[in-house]
Amino acid sequence: MNYRVFGASGVRVSEVGFGGWGIGGAYGSVDRAESLRTLARAEELGCNFVDTAMVYGDSELVLGEFLAGRRSKWLVATKFSGQPEGLEATLEKQLVRLGTDAVDLYQVHWAPSRAEQALYDALYRIRKSGKARLVGISLYSIGDINSVLKQGQIDVIQLPFSLLDPDPFLAKLDAIRRAGVGVIIRSSLKEGFLTGKYRRDAVFPDPNDQRHGWTAEQIASTVDAAEQFRFIEAQTASMAVAAACYPLSFAETSTVILGTKSVAQADSNFGLVPGTRLSDATLRRIEARQRAMRLYDWKGRIRDTLSFF
Ligand SMILES: NC(=O)c1ccc[n+]([C@@H]2O[C@H](COP(=O)([O-])OP(=O)(O)OC[C@H]3O[C@@H](n4cnc5c(N)ncnc54)[C@H](OP(=O)(O)O)[C@@H]3O)[C@@H](O)[C@H]2O)c1
């Protein structure tokens, strides 16, 4: 495992983190004992960061069980997802579920609107009280990044970034670096479609699976789009490793969180991904393919020097 920092906070985080949605059932049924073994394997391989939320099924409860006796080895991040009792009361409940006195990062699950500025004040209060070491916002768009960076006091942002979704991260690299915020990259495997394991006729019968509601056309077109990036597999152990290590080509990434729910996935995500880097030539080919597929909706230019490590 390699380690990076959460921006100016200096908090040291493993460059691959544990995405906790899968162990809550986001991608179909889960086996609790296997989830606990998977977390233990991630720890063995040097992972020290887990991201969850109260709305991720049993994820926080499984983590509470797992973290007993090993809390100091992990940075624990969870989120406020708009529960009616408000941010501070919800955090209190989550601390009980997670079996801890404080979380390392507390995030709001969306970028607050102008009418929701009180959420920022609540985040700053819990940071001051010590119930959260760092505070963050999980967001989606270029506009979201602009509004959050304007606040000036947010430690970490979390955003989607993958071969198929170069925006908004690449559009805002310079502003993110200047702001000194830490960056959590999510969804870099694109609900599993960038692992190369699904065909155009894939079906997701489990009603709890995030992909259950996808139309046959959506599935086929996502598989077709992912196939456009098959060439990156050549340099790596698998397409899943190649897609997962793409965000690590950018120095602004603090950690890429991978949804992991089996020991075999942990071996790949925490064992193979950290040792893998894409070459400059591959990164340029990726950018050319992304441009040909019109995956950018901004007019900017990706900077010339892509590799830092
Ligand atoms: N708004 C938000 O704040 C937000 C939204 C989405 C996600 N998140 C966070 O980001 C994390 C990651 O996102 P994600 O879980 O949606 O997506 P992801 O990590 O991009 O993809 C998970 C999918 O990839 C598959 N997978 C994982 N490792 C694999 C491997 N080594 N080989 C083959 N397939 C593999 C999983 O397969 P299986 O189906 O077989 O398990 C699952 O289908 C979440 O767990 C959550 O913590 C936050």
Image: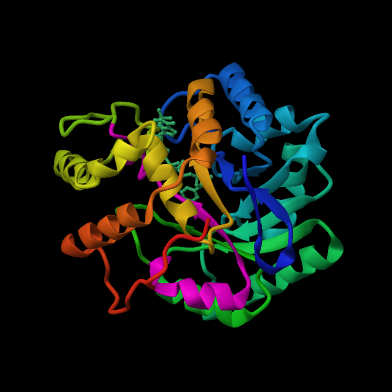
Ligand 1 placement by image quarter: top left
Residue 123 x, y percent position in the rendering: 71, 67
Q: Is residue 301 magenta?
A: no
Identified at 66% across, 60% down, the residue is 6
Asked which quadrant contains residue 120, the reply is bottom right
Residue 210 x, y percent position in the rendering: 37, 39
Q: As rendered, which of 76 and 210 lies closer to the eye?
A: 76
* Stretch of the chain drawn in magenta: 168-196
Identified at 68% across, 41% down, the residue is 48
Identified at 64% across, 23% down, the residue is 36
Q: Is residue 280 above or below residue 148?
A: above
Residue 112 x, y percent position in the rendering: 54, 71
Q: As rendered, which of 232 and 127 lies closer to the eye?
A: 232
Decide if residue 309 is in sight here: yes
Decide if residue 211 is in sight here: no
Image quadrant where one finds the N terminus: top right
